[in-house]
Amino acid sequence: MKKLYILLTACILLTACQNLELEHEAVGFLKLEVGTDKTTQTRAEDEYNPKQIAVKIVNSAGKTVEETDDWTTWTEAIELPVGTYTIEASSAGFDGKTAGWDKPYYAAKETVDIKMNTNTSKEIVCKLANVLVTVEFSDDFRAAFQSAVVGVSDKSNSDNKVTFEMRQASETGKAYFPVTDLISNLTVSNHKGELHSKKDIITGIKAQENVILRYRIASSGSSNINVSIDDATKTYTYTIGVPVTSTSTLIASANAWSTFAYLTAEVPSFAEVFDQSKLEFQYKTVDAAEWTKVTTNINVEEKDKKFSTKLTGLTPATAYQYRLCYNEGLEKGLTSDIVDFTTETPIELYNGNFDNWWRQEEKDSSPWYAISSNDATSFDNSDSHYLFSFWDSGNGGTVTLSKNPTSPESSEVHTAGGKSAKLASQYVGVKFLNMGKFAAGNVFTGHFCSANMKTYQAKINFGQPFSSRPTQLTGWFKYNRGTEIDEGSGSYKTILEAAGGDLCSIYIALTDNAGFNYDGKNFAYQIDGDLSGDDPANFKYKNAIDFSEANKDIIAYGSITDEEAKGTGAWQQFTIDLQYRDLTRTPKYIIVVASASKYGDYFTGSTNSVMYVDDLELIYGDTPVMSE
């Protein structure tokens, strides 16, 4: 142990005051001797500069009474009132909290009593208060890899770091860290130019200790770590085995939509030293010979060292590959592993033009379905489950009273020669006998299960299996709304009256909830008017499905605006942006609903409201909208 000392002799200057009118405070005089303990230093040429030590003298009330950035300037005795003091000595201009090369931090704290008429001297020895870290590479390691980089960082603050590089010479660098758990991220390039990484955590470190990270080739292709301790010098040697063909440093994934893909890669140690401007993503179709550079900018998340970009102009339902490249490595260019991905297949909205319709019999007691006759294969007249079709409506309940609020229309169409869906809200039953209920003309993706004619409530399943991610729903509608709200009461009637009449609705939702099985078919949600209340855990609701942000199963949602919902009395085009709440999840179900009375679920609206819907289409663009 090497120590530097500056002798502190305290002398007391006493003045005998004979004048009773002059009073003096009882004082003493202090002089310090400060030294450093450099036990963990390893190289003799690193002589310590004693001017790096700053000193503070703090009285018993916690007030600093004397301080200096260079203790050697205190060549004279320090006059202090009698009392107890704390002397704090530490490296000047550095608090030891920041990692850095050759920046040891020394500190000590001692107390001293200053007594009247007494010479006091105090010796303070500053010891290393941070941690010395060195990195070594064995000969077999140097032979196996053409380059290596070790980024050592503070576990609680990844920005507090130092990077070690493997050079041809065998000397090791040394760095100092605060007393905390450390993370070492090793990145190596083998002689094939393949980039690999390894991460280790060093815990339980104390001040004045030395940590040596010694990298070697792992035996039998496995990765291992051994720790040896030299109690005499408090040196911890971590011998870390590194396989030559270890797991790739690239943690990559592709979030592929129909015509574009989000590409991501994480290379923790790679980001420590490489110039990020030299990184680029490359892609190609699986059977192509040449790679193409992605021209969009690479986004960098500094904290997590993640790189991402958006690749557009892709062909749907096509297999692609991508990789991350570094144009100029430590010795030559480096390339990550290849990642495969396939773009989604855009799924069209079945019978979105509503040209196809079918019912079993040509009479009012037989429900209309927006389906082709060739697809009408699941109808069973022996029970009340009706037809399983992509589109359904409330007709399954109203036909018991010979009404079809939803029906095909040939004269009011957007595209000549085809059909549209006519949605006519009406009272179904005998109103003056108070037998029946208001029924909104509607069409939805799902299945009408049953109607309870005692309570006039229905059980309806919503959602059809679906696995693509459109960005918009577009189409045409013509809406003649009733201005007199003649059905319903309460807050929903008040809303409609304030809006000047009934409102229509068109909305779309994508969801990835588990859903449920009903007679061998899968659905997302169920509305059952006979429930006492909502049961979201089992995907069941009494009146309306919760599409709010509170429903975490909803991936995307969109609807026409309140102004559009008033209609114009003429054909008008609408475009609904699907507002995505998560760009990484893929749906399991699609829900599309159109209704001539927005609050028909609550039996509120106008019996004069008629809506025509035609030419619905899903758009697969390359710019999804995020929900606000």
Image (cartoon, rainbow, N blue to C red):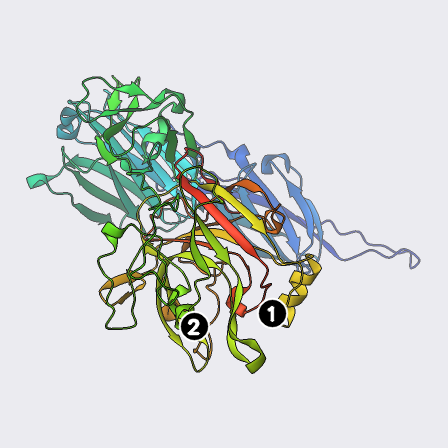
Instruction: Provide the secondary structure element on which disc 2 rests.
Output: helix
Type of residue at label 1?
Glu
Q: Which numbered disc, 2 or 1, marks the residue that appears first in the sequence?
A: 2
Q: Residue at x 40, y 58 (%)?
A: 553
**How far, Cα to Cα, is label 2 from label 1?**
18 Å
Q: Where residue 295 sits in the image (x, y, percent)?
A: 38, 21
SS category of the residue bearing label 1: loop
In the picture, measured across the screen, residue 496 lies left or right of residue 430, that is right
Q: Residue pushed farthest left?
A: 220
Residue position for label 2: 401
Residue 511 percent location from the top left of the image: 38, 54
Q: From the viewer's side, name the closer residue of 462 and 197.
A: 462
Mark carried by residue 322: none
Q: Is residue 560 above or below residue 74?
A: below
Q: Judge whether residue 41 can be spotted in this image.
A: no
Q: Position of residue 374 (x, y in %)?
A: 23, 50
Q: Is residue 507 left or right of residue 245?
A: right
**Residue 308 seen in the figure:** yes
Residue 470 lies, in percent from the top left, at: 39, 41
Give the image quarter of residue 258: top left
In this picture, is 455 found above or below 561?
A: below
- Which is nearer the eye, 113 or 158? 158
Residue farthest right in this picture: 21
Task: Check disc 2: other Cα within 10 Å, few if <14, some if 14-19, many if 20+.
Answer: some
352 and 561: which one is in front? Answer: 352
Label tally: 2
Identity of the amino acid at label 2? Leu
601, 426: nearer the viewer: 426
Q: In the rendered image, which quarter contains the N terminus?
A: top left
- How many residues crowd mark 1 within 10 Å: few (<14), some (14–19), many (20+)? some
Write the residue at 46% across / 61% down: 405
The residue that disc 1 covers is 487
